[in-house]
Image (cartoon, grey):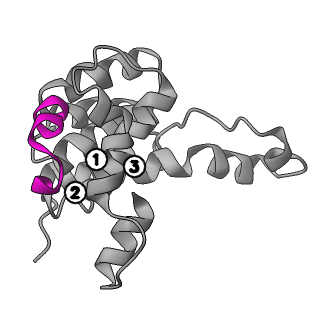
Amino acid sequence: LALALAWRVIGLAGPWSEERLFPLTGLAKNSQIDEMDEGQAYSLTHAVFFMTDFGSRPAGLPDAARTSVVSNAERWAAAFERRANHDLYAELALACCCAGGEAAWAEGGLRAVQAADGMVPGPGLRSPQLLAGVTAERRRFLENYHTTLAAIMTSLAVTVGLERR
């Protein structure tokens, strides 16, 4: 989906199309999702991001999937908040906004875990090789930068919106 979006955005005919690839996603196969593991949640959020061009085309996501995401994002995100996975909490809120919903509910949860320097704690890195020999400061950055960026984008989507002008 990411490549299909990239080729479409730069105006090139590509071998991929969102219309052909979306039906292969977990979201398309099961829009009535009750619970998700981390892999399923990341798959869902990224399908939403790419199908909506990061919120500039909410209608790019088929109606059933869009309705499911907007209706369930807060509940799904709350499950990851309970697991202290602030990365998926932020990504699910952002996916809700990209699908045309509102996620004002996310700001309090993200603000509550934000450090004094603005960092939002991530789920950590699962690759010890990436952390071998790095300073504590670099480790803190590597473990938290993605979640902090996801939280910033979510805050922007909630307060300003995602429509491109």
Spot occupied by residue 109 in the image (x, y as percentages of width and height): 30, 29
Instruction: Report if the CB atoms under discs 1 and 2 are less than 8 Å apart.
Output: yes
Spot occupied by residue 53 in the image (x, y as percentages of width and height): 26, 63
- Calculate the distance from the C-alpha at mark 1 to the C-alpha at mark 3: 14 Å
At 12% across and 65% down in the image, what residue appears? Answer: 163
- The label on residue 48 is 1
Out of 114 and 25, give the one closest to the viewer: 25
**Amino acid type for the residue under numbered disc 2:** Thr
Quadrant of the snapshot with the N terminus: bottom left
- Calculate the distance from the C-alpha at mark 1 to the C-alpha at mark 2: 6 Å
Give the mark toward the camera: 1 or 3: 1
- The label on residue 52 is 2
Overall secondary structure of the magenta stretch? helix
Label 2 neighbourhood size at 10 Å, few (<14), some (14-19), many (20+)? many
At 51% across and 50% down in the image, what residue appears? Answer: 146
- Calculate the distance from the C-alpha at mark 2 to the C-alpha at mark 3: 16 Å
Spot occupied by residue 83 in the image (x, y as percentages of width and height): 47, 16
Q: Is residue 160 magenta?
A: no
At 31% across and 30% down in the image, what residue appears? Answer: 29
Image-based side of 124 in relation to 80, left or right: right
Q: Is residue 68 magenta?
A: yes
The magenta segment: 58-69
Give the mark toward the camera: 2 or 3: 2
The residue that label 3 is drawn on is 150
Image-based side of 51 in relation to 13, left or right: left
Spot occupied by residue 34 in the image (x, y as percentages of width and height): 28, 14
